Amino acid sequence: MKRKFRLRKSTDFKRVRRLGKSYAHPFVVLVVHPNELESTRFGVSAGRSVGNAVLRNRAKRRIREAIRPRIGEIQPGWDLIFLARKSIHEAGSPELQTAIDRLLRRAGVLKGNNVN
């Protein structure tokens, strides 16, 4: 995922976590909040409960890879944070892709969806 699409600042993560609306799935949690920009930014996080550093980094890479094909389908003007859950390691790539698609649909951030 290109850097221009990433949330990088801690203050941005905190703002989205505090003010955003969350949508849960057994593998991933999605937190969305509108931004004042003409683009959508993504953040990916994995806490210590996901595992050691190797497992956390693997989980984040898998989430980023599942988001990549959907970037063009997401409406501009959103900040999205994906939080990995411990059970993400049990999911195959198609299952993770399906989970992320469902979360994006539920959040209403895909083009053609009604925004909550």
Image (cartoon, rainbow, N blue to C red):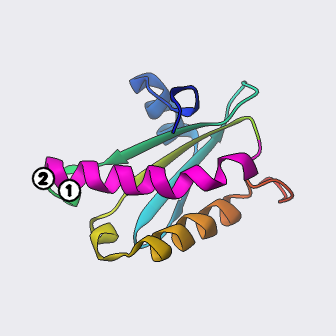
Task: Characterize the magenta stretch by its predominant secondary structure.
Answer: helix
Residue type at mark 2 is Asn
The residue labelled by disc 1 is 55
Task: State the residue at coordinates (12%, 52%).
Answer: 52
Q: Is residue 92 magenta?
A: no
Residue 11: percent from the left, percent from the top? 44, 23
Q: Dot 2, crowdedness within 10 Å: few (<14), some or many (≥20)?
A: few
Nearest the camera: 12 or 27?
Answer: 27
Task: State the residue at coordinates (53%, 68%).
Answer: 97
Q: Is residue 59 magenta?
A: yes
Q: From this viewpoint, which residue is outermost toward the left? A: 52
Residue type at mark 1 is Leu
Q: Looking at the image, is 26 positioned above or below residue 65?
A: below
The residue labelled by disc 2 is 52
Residue 68: percent from the left, percent from the top? 56, 50
Task: State the residue at coordinates (47%, 76%).
Answer: 95
Q: Dot 1, crowdedness within 10 Å: few (<14), some or many (≥20)?
A: some
Residue 104: percent from the left, percent from the top? 64, 60
State the separation of the CA atoms marked 1 and 2. 5 Å
Disc marking residue 85:
none
98 relative to 106 in the view: left or right: left
Nearest the camera: 1 or 14?
Answer: 1
Count of number-bearing discs: 2
The reply to whether callout 1 and callout 2 are in contact (CB within 8 Å) is yes
Whether residue 54 is visible here, answered yes or no, is: yes
Residue 66: percent from the left, percent from the top? 51, 58
| Disc 1 secondary structure class | helix
Q: Magenta segment, which residues? A: 53-75
